[in-house]
Image (spheres, grey):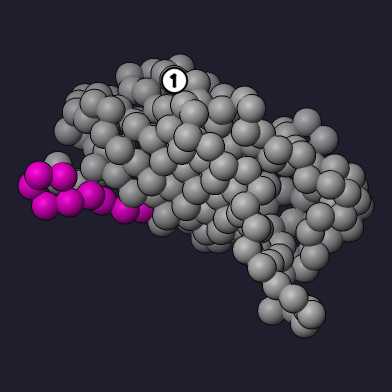
Amino acid sequence: MSARAQSWRQILSAGGGAGPALSAAAAASCIPTGKRIILPNNFFNVDDVLKITLAGQISCAVATPGTARFDVRMGPSGTIVVFDTGGLNLNIVAKTNVPFWLEILLTCRAVGAVTASNFMGVANFQSEAVIGAPANAAGGNGALLAPVGAPAVGTGFDNTAANAVDVFFTQTVATGSMTVQQYLVESLN
């Protein structure tokens, strides 16, 4: 942790309104439009931590559950992928509108202009829609850590400019759906 005179946890954006119901096999913003935020120029310092929490409902089909993939995007228009969970395997048992919880921690590793800023990220995705998870009534939920594969810094972005923050969801097949019902972005420094 860098030496600072003060440190605090700050909620940057929060909401309980529903995001769009996503059911296509294509990447799309999953947070409520009014909850997207723009961080000011030079917002991050090295070792700053951004925490993003999503909760909502997810469905998957029996024969073709596919994967769920979440990515955090920044940049002037919120299009640069700074963290990607990779494809998280969904349950081969049909699930309809079961709860999910996703928590993402992003630690700033470098700051600068153009593409010099980046994050190291890790996430935890929990739901009975996760591969191998039993139903809630039968013993609980499954959890998957992300990213799939080895953790690595994400794509670089420009910290000297204002950055829009967005979260996208992609499923590999159009046989399920996902809706964010709660959303929280916190600065932990």
Quarter of the figure with residue 66: top left
Towards the viewer: 152 or 184 = 184
Q: Is residue 10 left or right of residue 163?
A: left
Secondary structure of the residue carrying tag 1 is loop
Above/below status of 134 relative to 26:
below
- Hey, what amino acid is under mark 1? Ala
Percent position of residue 46, x then y: 77, 68
Q: Is residue 142 magenta?
A: yes
Quarter of the figure with residue 1: bottom right
Q: Outermost residue toward the left? A: 138
Quarter of the figure with residue 21: top left
Identify the magenta region: 136-144
Towards the viewer: 6 or 98 = 6
Q: Which residue is mark 1?
A: 21
Q: Is residue 21 magenta?
A: no
- Regarding residue 147, the answer to whether it shows in the image is no
Percent position of residue 160, x then y: 90, 51
Q: Quadrant of the C terminus?
A: bottom right
Residue at 38% over, 46% down: 101
Percent position of residue 57, x then y: 34, 32
Percent position of residue 8, x then y: 66, 68
Towards the viewer: 180 or 23 = 180
How many numbered marks, from 0 up? 1
Residue at 71% over, 38% down: 37
Q: Is residue 12 left or right of residue 25?
A: right
Residue at 34% over, 41% down: 100
